[in-house]
Image (cartoon, rainbow, N blue to C red):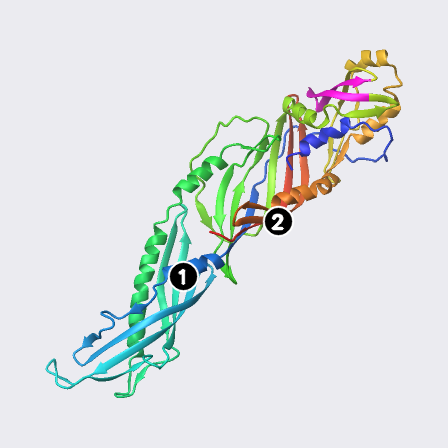
Amino acid sequence: MYRWLLILLLPVLLVCCVPGKKNAYNTLPPAASLPALQKSAINIPLNIVLTKFLANAQVLIPKEITSDGWPQYQQTSCDFHYKYRFIPGGFTFSCSNNQLQVKLAGAYQVAGEKCVCAFGKQTSPWIGGSCGFGKEPMRKTDIYIKSAVQIQPGYTVRTRSFTDRVVAPEKCLVSVFNLDITQQVLDSIKASTNAFCYSLDSVLNSMDFAATTRQLAQRINQKIPLDIYGFLRINPSAVKMSALNSKADSLQFILGISCYPEILSDSTNNFTASCLPPLQSGSLVPGITVYSNARYDYPFLSTLLNRQVKDSTFRVEGHTVIIRNVSVSGSGEGKVEIAVDFEGDRKGTLFLAGTPLLDTANQLIVIPDLDYSLKSKDLLLNLGKTFFSNKILKALREKASVSISSVVEQNRPSIDAQFNRVIREGVTTTGSFESVRIIAIVIGKETLQAQFVARANARIIITDL
């Protein structure tokens, strides 16, 4: 979309002697100044595929959770002691509105013994039973861990994880005393898991993205080169993040930035910032809507035009014309002047002048009053009127127009390609360009300005963290 201003003037130089269809344009004169710039919204969904991450996360889970002193018994009272071992299996996760839940499946074995005590002393032998030892299969159990995730305004992570519940579909009943010791095992497993949750929170809450955000802030608050098409200043005003949610094996959220971008031909960076706007939380609608002002000085435009048309060859009324240089300047009162140095069967400098007008409804740029300027008077006398006949002038006027929608369609494949590419290994983008509309143009004596709105959609897919 940064090529549009270049394309506005280019057709004037692509001389064609076959008259095109004449249109009636409902044009508007150039504005004295651009309208107030509306806020842009760049809301991009992020899809983090956790398959590989979850596989690697298995190493974070303890291989087993046991009672104190395992395989010896843990005495909880004078008349009772027991021992248990829990072996975690696979786990699944889900997330809804920043509330993460992990289900950790596993199996346990437990043995318990009881005796008779009098005055705090054992007076009988230990008698007990067990579940999950020997040939008996271990009992199944599920641990549910919940974690509340918050991204702070300073771009830090805060989590609060805890064991929500431990469920044992298969209980352990010691038949000698008809004693169900399942709950004691579950309470112990829950306490051990809570200790793990505390350690996990300590690690996550210590994560500091300050260095990353400083680098990003310095980058985003400076002018960004747009290849040969100038420099982009984003001018961010707010950064927002939606709630985290899961779908299948992916974690999803939308990251949004509000900004007032502008495109300039000047590379000078006179504004820097070391921080981003505080991160806000809230709902976001995916999509990209960019309102932008563009301001180019005429020497820069001349350089762009020469990259496209320098040394181009045309046939005009049987004559060969080779364009050697193009120079664009503002002549005041909304007019531009284009000087074309040419060689071939004839040699000289042709001066054209006209008033670019914008048809906002039909998205057309036209120069209906395009004519040879007074500076071309001597050239006309020297080369003769045939070379610059009214027929050629009429063709120039009709060809000196741009249909924005046609330009978009011609360039759509290359534009869409920028939305569908690999950023680096494990990070790709998908999306498509939708539309662009020119809102206003200002033809000044020193600069050419335009305001446009472009719409697109994009998504970032991360498969490797």
On the image, the x and y values in percent for residue 96 come to 47, 61
User: In the image, is residue 179 above or below residue 289?
Assistant: below
Give the amino acid type for the residue marked by disc 2 in the picture: Gly
Q: Give how far apart the Cα atoms at labels 1 and 2 are.
A: 33 Å
On the image, the x and y values in percent for residue 209 come to 40, 45
* Callouts 1 and 2 close, C-beta under 8 Å: no
The reply to whether residue 338 is in sight is no
Residue drawn 10% across the image and 82% down it? 119
Q: Residue furthest front?
A: 135
Q: Does the magenta stretch mainly form a helix, a strand or a loop?
A: strand
Q: Is residue 391 magenta?
A: no
Give the amino acid type for the residue marked by disc 1 in the picture: Gln
- Say which element carries label 1: helix
User: In the image, is residue 333 above or below residue 172?
Assistant: above
Residue 24 shown left or right of residue 202 in the figure: right
- Say which residue label 1 marks: 58
Q: Is residue 332 magenta?
A: yes
- Say which element carries label 2: strand
Tally of marks: 2
Give the magenta range.
Answer: 321-344
The reply to whether residue 254 is in sight is yes
Residue 318 shown left or right of residue 237 in the figure: right
- Say which residue label 2 marks: 431
Residue 193 shown left or right of residue 339 in the figure: left
- Label 2 Cα crowd, 10 Å radius (few <14 / some 14-19 / many 20+): some
Q: Which mark is residue 388?
A: none
Of badges 1 and 2, nearer the viewer stands 1
- Judge by depth and name the residue closer to the eye, 327 or 27: 327
Name the quadrant containing residue 297: top right
